[in-house]
């Protein structure tokens, strides 16, 4: 992996000056509350209890039957788990999904302008298996949602699915060697295996602005877009906003996508920004099947693996995707440890020089595209590239050249000061609004299991959340835990990750299906010993990258717990996704029986 080169490296004084600028800009935005500055959206606004895409939830009989596998979550993780199980012949797979259909985050998020920021030909899973070839380099949200449905239909996942339903408890029955699954609609059924695929972006969050409950105008979160109020569709055409004063809170990945379309349709748009995004070139365009080599067998798997290797720091002869992700991969925070393990000399100097090059180009782009100097100054991002998830757009920056768009920088007040019945107050100035849109994202990593909303009770009445609270994360490969037989967990905890998370989920689905197949073949249950858990935790701890120093200097965001820092620890596999997937393949071939226990015994 090669760092971007700079023709004239920064002098020590220039480096010192930039560090100081980063520090000053960070302090303008840090809030003492840290992550607690946000509120749970579902607790504050009633519209989160309803599904805008279903209307009236259809009545159905409660279920008291038995299935082979219960899958919690109908996003891509759950869909891929179900598909991989179907491919190996599992008959009854029941997916439980709180939404009205498959899709997960792509079911709920249908805001105007929504696209994936990872190339569609590597992001959309199972392209080889379904025969679908994306038309655009970066797929719009509706195409992604329809692809989720396509996979579910092809692998008959609708047959036993429960929609508009949430799992309310999982309880292990040691006598029957099954899980009792209860739901919020009165279902109580048995499952031999449970796979949890509850996602990492499922709990919308709102800023805890004083007086938010006093606001009398219309409001909604981008994950529950109110087309009944705005009119239009994800392509725009929001005629309901004509003549209205609209505000947007949030300028991250969602804000960067939705703000250009709101600007076209609102009477006047106010963008409330605490921290500007690093907005890189998007380069959206049509892509032909010939260009991606779709006539070749296995073309999508090859392209997906090529992308993963590049963004994971692995050497490749050719870059098949060739976009800003792969070009800037050497600056991504998750890759820093690979430089240090390889012993590259003067890493800090080389990394900082490369980071200056990239961020200076992004700041120069702001100056080139935004005509008003004061607005351009507020839109320049002053932090390292890996401090926040980069964004990509060719429409966002020019939006601020419109006379009907006002950027309200909230950094000096560390965010919006308060709200009134009429609007938003920043710097003592009240901005009256007819509508306020929250593009404030999700509580990353929060799920029903981690929040306690979905209690998981294993052998001898022990709760999974209690184990994690008392002992920290304890798993084998991130999938299985002692005391919780036949419970297979998908997600990023003690697992690997990547900017292309659907690839990670598909590899996890393959592994989950293999665990089920091995248990069935041997008449056993899937459960690691405590020794296996401890050994895996040691692997994660011994190679844990030094994230703490990097994030301590970053502008606040979800990467560093809103400025509180990101402590080092055994939370993820430390050597990258490519190495992790190789490790799993070898383990499945040679050692999978290690996680199997006789049904009559109790592991210690």
Image (cartoon, rainbow, N blue to C red):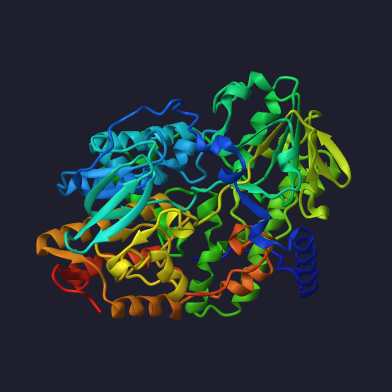
Where residue 328 appears, as percent x and y from the top left, is: 56, 57
Q: Note whether residue 290 is visible.
A: yes
Where residue 312 appears, as percent x and y from the top left, is: 45, 62
Give me the residue at 23% from left, 45% from top.
Answer: 93
Judged from this view, the residue extending furthest toward the right is 428
Q: Note whether residue 139 is visible.
A: no
Q: Closer to the camera, 266 or 302?
A: 266
Give me the residue at 56% from left, 44% from top.
Answer: 42
Dividing the picture into quadrants, the one containing residue 504 is bottom left
Q: Is residue 218 left or right of residue 342?
A: right
Question: Number of labelled discs?
Answer: 0
Where residue 250 appears, as percent x and y from the top left, is: 67, 44
Dividing the picture into quadrants, the one containing residue 176 is bottom left
Give me the residue at 58% from left, 42% from top.
Answer: 282
Where residue 21 appears, as percent x and y from the top left, is: 79, 64
Q: Is residue 299 left or right of residue 518?
A: right
Give me the residue at 37% from left, 65% from top.
Answer: 463
Q: Is residue 33 left or right of residue 187?
A: right
Q: Where, quadrant-wise, is the C terminus in this rendering?
A: bottom left
Q: Is residue 115 above or below residue 549?
A: above
């Amino acid at each position: 992996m090669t760092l971007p080169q700079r023709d004239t490296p920064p002098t020590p004084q220039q480096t010192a000056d930039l560090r100081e600028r980063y520090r000053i800009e960070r302090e303008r935005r840090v809030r003492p509350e840290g992550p607690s500055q946000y509120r749970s959206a579902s607790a504050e606004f009633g519209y989160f209890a309803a599904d805008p895409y279903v209307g009236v939830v259809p009545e159905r009989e409660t279920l008291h039957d038995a299935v082979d596998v219960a899958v919690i979550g109908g996003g891509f993780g759950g869909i891929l788990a179900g598909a991989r199980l179907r491919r190996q012949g599992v008959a009854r797979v029941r997916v439980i999904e709180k939404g009205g259909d498959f899709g997960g985050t792509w079911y709920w998020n249908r805001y105007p302008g929504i696209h994936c920021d990872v190339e569609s030909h590597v992001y959309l899973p199972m392209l080889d298996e379904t025969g679908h070839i994306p038309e655009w380099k970066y797929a719009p949200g509706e195409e992604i949602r329809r692809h989720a449905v396509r996979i579910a239909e092809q692998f008959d996942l609708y047959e036993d699915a429960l929609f508009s339903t949430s799992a309310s408890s999982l309880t292990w029955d040691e006598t029957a060697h099954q899980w009792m699954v209860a739901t919020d609609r009165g279902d109580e059924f048995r499952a031999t295996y449970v796979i949890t695929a509850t996602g990492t972006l499922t709990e919308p969050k709102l800023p805890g602005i004083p007086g938010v409950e006093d606001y009398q105008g219309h409001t909604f979160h981008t994950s529950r877009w109110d087309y009944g109020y705005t009119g239009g569709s994800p392509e725009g055409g929001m005629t309901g906003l004509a003549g209205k004063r609209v505000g947007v809170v949030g300028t991250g990945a969602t804000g960067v996508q939705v703000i250009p379309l709101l600007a076209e349709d609102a009477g006047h748009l106010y963008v409330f920004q605490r921290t500007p995004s690093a907005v890189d070139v998007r380069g959206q365009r049509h892509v032909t099947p010939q260009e991606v080599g779709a006539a070749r067998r296995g073309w999508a798997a090859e392209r997906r693996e090529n992308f993963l290797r590049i963004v994971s720091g692995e050497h490749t002869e050719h870059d098949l995707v060739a976009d800003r992700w792969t070009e800037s991969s050497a600056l991504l925070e998750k890759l820093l440890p690979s430089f240090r393990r390889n012993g590259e000399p003067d890493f800090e100097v080389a990394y900082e020089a490369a980071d200056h090059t990239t961020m200076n180009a992004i700041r120069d782009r702001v100056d080139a595209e935004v005509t008003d100097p004061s607005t351009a100054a507020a839109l320049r991002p002053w932090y390292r590239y890996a401090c926040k998830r980069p964004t990509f757009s060719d429409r966002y920056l020019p939006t601020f050249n419109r006379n009907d768009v006002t950027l309200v920088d909230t950094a000096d007040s560390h965010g919006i000061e308060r709200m009134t019945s009429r609007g938003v107050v920043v710097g003592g100035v009240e901005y009256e609004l007819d509508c306020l849109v929250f593009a404030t994202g999700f509580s990353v990593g929060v799920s029903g299991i981690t929040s306690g909303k979905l209690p998981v009770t294993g052998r001898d009445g022990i709760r999974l959340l209690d184990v994690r609270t008392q002992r920290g994360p304890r798993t084998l490969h991130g999938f299985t835990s002692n005391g919780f037989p036949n419970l297979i967990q998908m997600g990023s905890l003690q697992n690997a990750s990547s900017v292309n998370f659907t690839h990670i989920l598909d590899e996890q689905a393959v592994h989950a299906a293999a665990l089920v197949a091995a248990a069935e073949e041997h008449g056993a249950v899937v459960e690691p010993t405590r020794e296996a858990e401890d050994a895996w935790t040691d692997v994660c701890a011994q190679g844990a990258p030094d994230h703490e120093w990097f994030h301590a200097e970053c502008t606040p965001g979800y990467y560093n717990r809103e400025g509180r820092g990101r402590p080092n620890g055994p939370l993820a596999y430390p050597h990258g996704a490519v190495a992790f997937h190789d490790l799993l393949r070898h383990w499945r071939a040679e050692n999978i029986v290690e996680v199997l226990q006789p049904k009559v015994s109790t592991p210690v």
